[in-house]
Image (cartoon, rainbow, N blue to C red):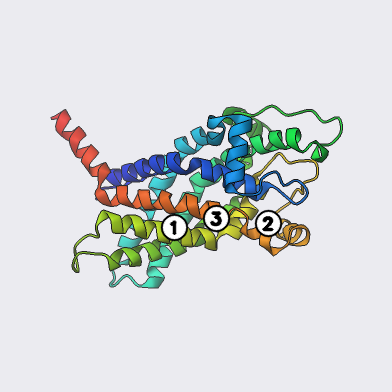
């Protein structure tokens, strides 16, 4: 498979997957961000119902434009980079589990370059509705005399961050994002490859598309739950707006200490169920599109039209 085809496959897979699961991802962000004393949502379904009631159906897609715009290169980089590293590491012989994990580590590190600014903007947009709803439904958590902030747009957030902190503003939470995405890729890619190999037709034949889908779902949900504690830390660090009764954090260590002290160890599992529901179909769809060679088909069709 050529590099353009790999990039196209990753982009198409990301667009389809994110469109399907974005409301659950929004619920995950809001559940992870709410702290003791300002709990507005009790579960995934409660969050989605309250979001629709207060913000309408399209309220579930707050921040989707940012995600859809940037998820194309993000997914493309992750899948293509993993393939590149696997091919490079297998030149000297059999691809061992350690080499598979190293390939995943390389893919995760490359992907973070795109992921961090995207996540930074997406989280602000997703969480804006929670802060607004909290002011209406839980006025006791709002400081007296405070003015209700307007819902920001992605461009307004980008300009504000650039003006105040420069390019570093968009990379707030970079350390936590690396701590989440590198271990995720280290777990996901080897697990997917080995599960997918179990369903191959013969020694060299490809696995059926449904095997790739199930393998992507199982590997994705396993890796997602495994790194959820770091995802909670990342989400908290990247959220700029908070309720008056909510903690602020100066870094990863400070965030871990305050969460343990004020909310207990179980807080690190907030949103784990939602994250598994988001990641499972997202990577299942991604692997099906990738292995079906949709990108190659589109490129060959365009080449034929030119001739």
Which residue does the image show at 77% across and 49% down from the upper left? 247
- At horizontal 55% and vertical 46% (from top left) the residue drawn is 116
State the image coordinates of residue 217 (x, y, percent, origin top left). Answer: 40, 56
Circle 3 — which element?
Answer: helix
Q: Quadrant of residue 140?
A: top right
Q: CA distance from mark 3 to mark 1?
A: 12 Å
Categorize mark 3 by other alpha carbons within 10 Å: few (<14), some (14-19), many (20+). some
Task: Tell which of 264 and 5 is nearer to you.
Answer: 264
Residue 157 seen by the camera: no
Residue named by callout 1: 220
* Dot 3 or dot 1, earlier in sequence: 1
Mark 3 or mark 2: name the one nearer the start of the chain: 2
Q: Is 43 above or below relative to 137?
A: below
Position of 263 compared to 109: left or right?
right
Residue 208 appears at what percent x and percent y? 24, 57
Q: Nearer the viewer, mark 2 or mark 1?
A: 1
Q: Which residue is mark 3?
A: 273
Percent across and percent down for residue 122 are 56, 39
Write the residue at 37% across / 42% down: 11
Residue at image mark 2: 252
Q: Is residue 226 above or below residue 165?
A: below
Gap in angstroms between the C-alphas marked 2 and 1: 24 Å
Q: Nearer the viewer, mark 3 or mark 2?
A: 3
Is residue 71 found left or right of 193 in the rendered image? Answer: right
Mark 2: few/some/many CA within 10 Å (<14, 14-19, 20+): some
Which marked residue is nearer to the observer: mark 3 or mark 1?
3
The part of the image, by quadrant, that contains residue 13 is top left
């Amino acid at each position: 498979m050529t590099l353009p085809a790999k990039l196209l496959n990753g982009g198409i897979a990301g667009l389809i997957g994110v469109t399907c699961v974005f409301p659950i991802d929004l619920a995950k962000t809001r559940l992870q961000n709410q702290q003791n004393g300002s709990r507005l949502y009790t579960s995934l379904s409660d969050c989605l119902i309250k979001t629709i009631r207060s913000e309408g159906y399209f309220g579930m897609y707050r921040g989707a434009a940012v995600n859809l715009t940037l998820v194309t290169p993000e997914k493309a980089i992750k899948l293509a980079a993993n393939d590149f590293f696997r091919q490079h590491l297998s030149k000297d012989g059999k691809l061992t589990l350690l080499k598979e994990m190293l390939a995943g580590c390389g893919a995760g590190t490359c992907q973070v370059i795109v992921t961090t600014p995207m996540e930074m903007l997406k989280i602000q947009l997703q969480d804006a509705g929670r802060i607004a709803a909290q002011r209406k439904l839980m006025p006791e958590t709002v400081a007296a005399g405070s003015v209700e902030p307007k819902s920001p747009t992605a461009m307004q957030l980008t300009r504000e961050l650039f003006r105040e902190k420069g390019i570093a503003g968009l990379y707030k939470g970079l350390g936590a994002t690396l701590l989440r995405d590198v271990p995720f890729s280290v777990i996901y890619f080897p697990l997917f490859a080995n599960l997918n190999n179990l369903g191959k037709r013969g020694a060299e034949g490809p696995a059926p598309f449904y095997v790739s889908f199930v393998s992507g779902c199982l590997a994705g949900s396993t890796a997602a739950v495994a790194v959820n504690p770091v995802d909670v830390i990342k989400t908290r660090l990247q959220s700029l707006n908070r309720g008056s009764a909510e903690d602020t954090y100066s870094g990863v260590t400070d965030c871990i200490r305050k969460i343990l002290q004020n909310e207990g160890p179980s807080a690190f599992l907030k949103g784990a169920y939602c994250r598994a529901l988001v990641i499972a179909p997202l990577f299942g769809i991604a692997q099906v599109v990738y292995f079906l060679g949709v990108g190659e088909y589109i490129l060959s069709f365009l080449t034929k039209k030119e001739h």
